[in-house]
Amino acid sequence: AGLFASYRIPIGRASLEPALRFELRRVRGSSADQSLWYADLPTTAYNLTDGTVSDTQLIGGAGLLLRFADMLSVGLDYSYGGSSGVYRSENLRLLLRAPF
């Protein structure tokens, strides 16, 4: 689930668009077990075990986009993500959009 909001501010032939973004992501998975063995070594079995996965991640971001006559856009986008575990990430992107 998420929320995105932006607002267009006209500046002559261009427009400035500040934006905010919030997202909430949930991951859930049950545990899985697998057994396998090789045909030429039937007495040796291998067990693969994957534990239960549960995590909640919150992502927030802010951006600023400058559009020139609805053709060329230049912008800056920052986002931060954190989870219930130890995972954290920060991103800073420079955007350039042009038709071709």
Image: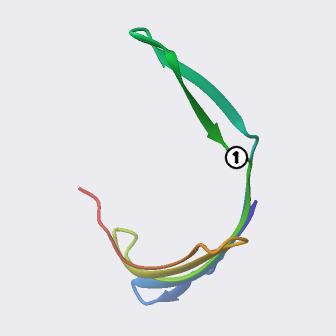
Q: Quadrant of the N terminus?
A: bottom right
Disc 1: which residue: 51
Residue 9, position in %: x, y?
55, 87
Residue 97, position in %: x, y?
33, 67
As drawn, the residue found furthest toward the left would be 100
As drawn, the residue found furthest toward the top would be 39
As drawn, the residue found furthest toward the bottom would be 11
* Quarter of the view holding residue 100: bottom left
Asked if residue 87 is positioned above or below residue 63 in the image, the reply reads above
Q: Nearer the viewer, residue 65 or 89?
A: 89
Q: Nearer the viewer, residue 11 or 33?
A: 33
Residue drawn at point x = 29 percent, y = 59 percent: 99
Asked if residue 89 is positioned above or below residue 10 in the image, the reply reads above
Task: Categorize mark 1 by other alpha carbons within 10 Å: few (<14), some (14-19), many (20+).
Answer: few
Residue 22, position in %: x, y?
69, 73
Colouring chosen for the image of the structure: rainbow
